[in-house]
Amino acid sequence: MNHSSSTFSAEIQQEELERHLLESALVDQEQLTLAKKIQVRQEGPLLMILFQLSFIDLHQFSGLLDWMTQAGADVC
């Protein structure tokens, strides 16, 4: 897998995560927009940014990691 295909895969996974966050009402659009702005500056994973901002708690963080693992298997 080359860099561009792994970047593409990460972008798809983030889009899926964003959709899931909004559909499950874990965060609202305003929170997601702020987290994405910070993510660009820090170049870190969206989940960590959401956790650092206290938009999600540790239990939600763990559940989202599990969800991403399952969703990642579905995307590949």
Image (cartoon, rainbow, N blue to C red):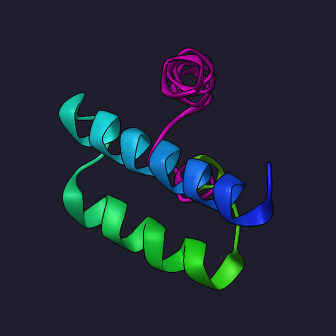
Secondary structure that dominates the magenta span: helix
Furthest toward the bottom, the residue is 41
Residue at 51% across / 26% down in the picture? 60
Q: 45 and 1: which one is in front? A: 1
Residue at 80% across / 48% down in the picture? 1
Residue at 52% across / 50% down in the picture? 54
Q: 70 and 66: which one is in front? A: 70
Q: Per the image, is 51 magenta?
A: yes
Quadrant of residue 23 within the rendered picture: top left
Q: Per the image, is 12 magenta?
A: no
Q: Does 56 appear above or below 37?
A: above
Instruction: State the extent of the magenta-drawn residues as a range.
Output: 49-76
Quadrant containing the C terminus in the rendered view:
top right
How many numbered marks are there? Answer: 0
The spot of residue 63 in percent (x, y) is 55, 18
The spot of residue 42 in percent (x, y) is 69, 77
The spot of residue 71 in percent (x, y) is 50, 22
Residue at 58% across / 31% down in the picture? 61
Furthest toward the right, the residue is 2
Quadrant of residue 58 within the rendered picture: top right
Q: Does 43 appear above or below 24?
A: below
Judged left or right of residue 2, residue 11 is left
The spot of residue 28 in percent (x, y) is 22, 51
Q: 22 and 1: which one is in front? A: 1
